[in-house]
């Protein structure tokens, strides 16, 4: 979109700079004059932070105030642009939530920008994973609240189950300003945040874990080309049935088959130090787009228990889901949304489709002079690794700092060992030491530094060049392989060349890399030249094609997930409207007094309103919990409808709508039943907790069955 309107405002703001510099005290900004606001905000930042915003930072601020996603390159000062925009919204009388990807950035930015906000008369607070309820209440009462997306979502879920109006913590949503917008709005959009209540301990299956360790790939089971599905061969099924003494495919006793499949998936498709790590006696998932530990995140209960059994760990607690919301559903609650990131254009289609957002590309303050080399492509992984180590050793000998981005934890640690054998001392940054992330990445630009990092690579932390490093060519970024998303590659490249610094980047790729073998398995790669490098143009095409296929697959998964979840979000909105009328008003009293006037008259006048309120709230919450369980079971099996040439999504919607209508009647029935009981049972879970569910990476059991049946039909 054109930036001309913003540029005119910035130019007008510059004309007011001299007058403001002469003032001892800055005037209160008026938001009906954006040029005045920009001029005052610039002067306030200069006085309080020692940072005088560049024109491009003001352009970014104006784009945010205009409800856009601002694409600003790494090192261009997004944090200050975001703070100026947040202050602008606050000065319009709106509560602003600045949503980040983790606790560290939320606290750092709120405290760093605090003096700036204070100069403009705007209050600011922050929340994190360890914030107490009172600290959260205080932070949300501020004009601007910084917080990680998960914590804000968990607070919303907790508030949805409050039984007293004065216990609600989160104010009505008004403005969401999202840092790392592509990560939050796209990569994590379909992640469900869950509020669970205690039922019983999780059930691990150690016997199944031990059994699948005996199975041999290619004989007992096969894995599909994209490594998303694993299934028993006929010989494998016979062997398992003999070992267990059961019929696996007995439709009346499906539990054994389900347990076996979960154990097999955990064994064959989930790799330690790639998909998860084991730390402090617990399985901790790794966020695939950021390389960090996904705090509080878990797979659906059955798969989680299977991985815990695989690692011989005690089962984690299991509970029923009381409520849930996807990250996408959480963000869409806000009437006004804006965001900033270094890589927005690549996901502009998704931002428009799912949020109605447009992208404004903000130019860099200084031209980027980073030298991005073409990929170096090799026939095999060992060839690539050998060339990668040679390149690192050769460049390191010059003193130039090197940042190597790897695809997973295991690769980062293996590469570090190879470098150590050559006498080099790399610093490793991965999900196992993510607490030191900012400190490690901040030193990556110093002379002689070798930093081996997973995709986390310190987004949000600048890499400043050490003395004499610019003369050596600046930071040299090396990717050990292409990611499934070109954005992640661009983010890694963007660690070098900030603010006009020199720098360079190159990716080492093998035609045996997972990206190629999983997404373009039928493509035949070209041969290497005599020196072992694949230079034929088809090699570069193959890598790009595999990445485009992977991005298309992920987009379709996003679309498909939203087709199912948007109906659930709509039904939840309707339930919440009803619940709010009960919680804040006299809807419960009116309903129950009309349903049974005699019983109503028999209750003490000073307690009956509250009694009615608690009875109806309990019925709403229990029925909604059961509705969620019904929809989960429905989703698990709905894909079989495709075998009958019916649309699974249409069938899901049809049944979900019918079930919702019956839910409304059931709430009324249970409310009246409890109301008429001498002592109504209004017990709630003795313990609740929150977590994120990572979508089952292999789809539902029925997804996999359907794919196998469909594939068999095609072969037939």
Image (spheres, rainbow, N blue to C red):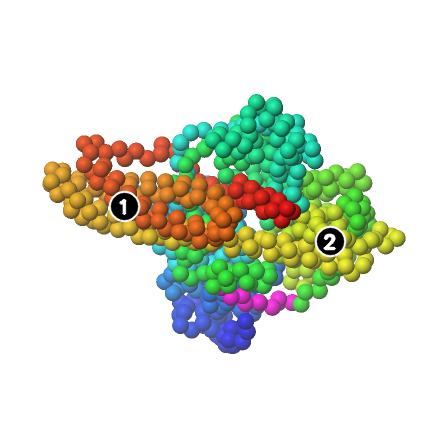
Give the quarter of the image for residue 257: top right
Q: Position of residue 251 (x, y in %)?
A: 49, 33
Residue drawn at x 40%, y 72% as measured from the top left? 32
Quadrant of the rendered image containing residue 219: top right
Give the labeled residue for mark 2: 523
* Quadrant of the drawing holding the N terminus: bottom right
In the rendered image, residue 479, in percent from the top left (x then y), is placed at 71, 51
- Residue extending farthest to the front is 716
First to last magenta residue range: 357-366
Residue 362 within the magenta-colored segment of the rendering: yes
Image spot of residue 373 (x, y percent) = 75, 59
Front residue of 347 and 438: 347
Q: How many marks?
A: 2
Task: Tell whether position 493 is magenta.
Answer: no
Kindly tell me whether residue 127 is visible in this rendering: no
Q: CA distance from mark 2 to mark 1?
A: 57 Å
Secondary structure under tag 2 reads: loop
Residue at x 23% of width, y 37% of height: 674
Q: Is residue 369 above or below residue 180?
A: below
Instruction: Name the N-terminal-most of marks 2 and 1.
Output: 2
- Element type at marker 1? helix
Q: Is residue 635 left or right of residue 294?
A: left
Residue drawn at 73 percent across, 53 percent down: 523
Main secondary structure type of the part rendered in magenta: loop
What number is the disc on residue 665? 1
- Examine the image and state in which quarter residue 24 appears: bottom left
From the viewer's side, name the closer residue of 432 and 595.
Answer: 595
Q: How many other residues sit within 10 Å of disc 2, few (<14), some (14-19) or many (≥20)?
A: few
């Amino acid at each position: 979109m054109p930036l001309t309107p913003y540029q005119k405002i910035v130019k007008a703001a510059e004309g007011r700079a001299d007058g403001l510099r002469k003032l001892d005290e800055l005037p209160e900004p008026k938001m009906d004059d954006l040029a005045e606001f920009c001029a005052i905000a610039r002067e306030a930042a200069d006085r309080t932070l020692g940072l005088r915003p560049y024109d491009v930072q003001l352009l970014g601020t104006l784009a945010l105030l205009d409800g856009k996603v601002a694409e600003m390159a790494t090192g261009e000062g997004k944090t200050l642009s975001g703070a100026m925009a947040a202050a602008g919204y606050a000065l319009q009388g709106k509560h602003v939530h600045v949503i980040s990807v983790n606790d560290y950035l939320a606290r750092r930015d709120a405290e760093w920008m605090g003096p700036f906000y204070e100069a403009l008369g705007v209050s600011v607070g922050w929340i994190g994973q360890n914030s107490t309820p009172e600290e959260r209440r205080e932070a949300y009462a501020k004009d601007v609240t910084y917080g990680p997306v998960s914590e804000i979502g968990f607070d919303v879920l907790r508030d949805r189950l409050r039984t007293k109006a004065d216990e609600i913590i989160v104010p009505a949503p008004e403005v969401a300003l999202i840092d790392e917008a592509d990560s939050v709005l796209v990569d994590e959009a379909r992640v469900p945040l869950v509020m669970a209540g205690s039922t019983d301990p999780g059930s691990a299956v150690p016997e199944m874990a031990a059994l699948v360790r005996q199975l041999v790939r290619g004989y007992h089971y096969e894995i599909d080309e994209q490594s998303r599905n694993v299934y028993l061969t006929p010989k494998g099924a016979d062997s398992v049935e003999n070992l267990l003494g059961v019929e696996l495919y007995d439709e009346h006793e499906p539990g054994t088959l389900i347990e076996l499949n979960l154990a097999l998936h955990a064994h064959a498709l989930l790799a330690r130090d790639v998909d998860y790590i084991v730390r402090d006696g617990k399985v901790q998932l790794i966020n695939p787009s950021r390389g960090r530990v996904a705090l509080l995140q878990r797979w659906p209960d059955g798969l989680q228990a299977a991985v815990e059994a695989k690692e011989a760990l005690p089962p984690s607690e299991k509970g029923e889901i009381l409520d849930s919301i996807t990250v996408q559903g959480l963000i869409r609650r806000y009437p006004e949304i804006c965001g900033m990131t270094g890589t927005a254009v690549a996901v502009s289609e998704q931002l428009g489709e799912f949020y109605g957002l447009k992208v404004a590309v903000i130019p860099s303050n200084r031209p980027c002079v980073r030298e991005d080399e073409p990929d170096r492509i090799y026939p095999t992984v060992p060839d690539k690794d050998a060339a990668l180590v040679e390149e690192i050793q050769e460049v390191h000998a010059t003193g130039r700092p090197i940042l190597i981005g790897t695809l997973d934890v295991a690769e980062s640690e293996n590469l570090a060992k190879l470098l150590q054998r050559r006498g080099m001392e790399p610093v490793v940054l991965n999900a196992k030491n993510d607490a030191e992330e900012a400190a490690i990445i901040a030193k990556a630009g110093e002379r002689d530094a070798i930093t081996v990092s997973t995709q986390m690579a310190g987004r949000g932390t600048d890499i400043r060049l050490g003395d004499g490093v610019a003369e050596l060519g600046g930071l040299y970024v090396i990717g050990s392989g292409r990611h499934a998303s070109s954005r992640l590659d661009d983010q890694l490249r963007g660690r070098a060349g900030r603010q006009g610094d020199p720098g360079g980047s190159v990716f080492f790729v093998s035609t045996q890399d997972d990206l190629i073998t999983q997404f373009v398995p039928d493509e035949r790669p070209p041969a290497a030249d005599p020196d072992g490098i694949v230079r034929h143009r088809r090699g570069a095409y193959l890598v790009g094609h595999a990445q485009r296929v992977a991005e298309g697959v992920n987009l379709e998964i996003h679309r498909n997930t939203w087709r199912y979840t948007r109906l659930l979000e709509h039904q939840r909105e309707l339930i919440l409207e009803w619940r709010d009328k009960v919680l804040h008003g006299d809807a419960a009293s009116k309903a129950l007094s009309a349903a049974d006037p005699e019983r109503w008259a028999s209750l003490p006048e000073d307690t009956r309103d509250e009694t009615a309120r608690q009875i109806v709230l309990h019925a709403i919450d229990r029925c909604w919990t059961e509705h969620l369980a019904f929809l989960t079971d429905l989703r698990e099996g709905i894909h079989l409808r495709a075998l009958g040439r019916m649309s699974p999504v249409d069938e899901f919607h049809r049944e979900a709508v019918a079930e919702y209508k019956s839910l409304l009647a059931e709430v009324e029935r249970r409310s009246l039943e409890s109301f008429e009981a001498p002592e109504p049972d209004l017990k709630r879970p003795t313990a609740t907790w929150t977590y994120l569910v990572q979508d089952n990476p292999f789809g539902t059991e029925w997804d996999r069955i359907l794919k196998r049946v469909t594939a068999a039909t095609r072969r037939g």
